[in-house]
């Protein structure tokens, strides 16, 4: 959605409020400065990445279960590392 005024148009952004302790805010602000991003971008990006990682993990579990139910062969991570672990 565009929000327009006499100065031009910008994308309107929704606001989400989260509550953190003063110490947590100080740490988050430090991390934002460390990464060279705004506090908002730090929280948004890292939260989104973690959610995407969790989604990928759950999707992989469902796919593995489906694969196993169909009687398809699987290989454990230990077997993969044993076979390919020495690759540099």
Image (cartoon, grey):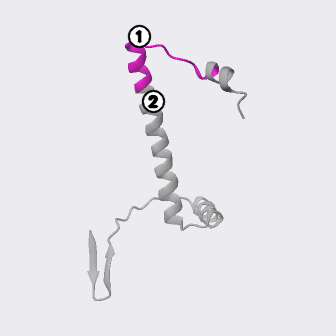
The quarter of the image holding the N terminus is: bottom left
Which region of the structure is painted magenta?
63-78
Which residue is disc 1 drawn over? Answer: 71
> Eyeballing the image, is 87 above or below 40?
above
Q: What residue is at 64 percent from the left and 20 percent from the top? A: 78
Magenta stretch: includes residue 67 = yes
76 left or right of 72 in image: right
Residue 4 position by quadrant = bottom left
SS at circle 1: loop
> Eyeballing the image, is 27 above or below 79?
below
Q: Position of residue 56 (x, y in %)?
A: 46, 37
Q: What residue is at 43 percent from the left and 38 percent from the top? A: 55
Q: Residues within 10 Å of mark 1 (few under 14, many from 20)?
A: few
25 left or right of 58 in image: right
Q: From this viewpoint, which residue is outermost toward the front?
A: 87
Foreground pick, 67 / 5: 67
86 left or right of 66 in image: right
Foreground pick, 58 / 64: 64
Which residue is disc 2 drawn over? Answer: 60
How far is the residue under mark 2 from the one under mark 1?
17 Å
In front of the other: label 2 or label 1? 1
């Amino acid at each position: 959605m565009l929000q327009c005024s006499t100065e031009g148009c910008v994308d309107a952004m929704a606001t989400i409020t989260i509550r953190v302790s003063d110490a947590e805010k100080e740490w988050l602000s430090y991390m934002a400065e460390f990464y060279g991003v705004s506090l908002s971008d730090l929280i948004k990006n890292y939260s989104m990445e973690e959610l995407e990682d969790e989604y990928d993990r759950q999707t992989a579990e469902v796919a593995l279960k489906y694969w196993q139910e169909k009687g398809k062969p699987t290989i454990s991570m230990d077997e993969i590392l044993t076979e390919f672990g020495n690759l540099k």
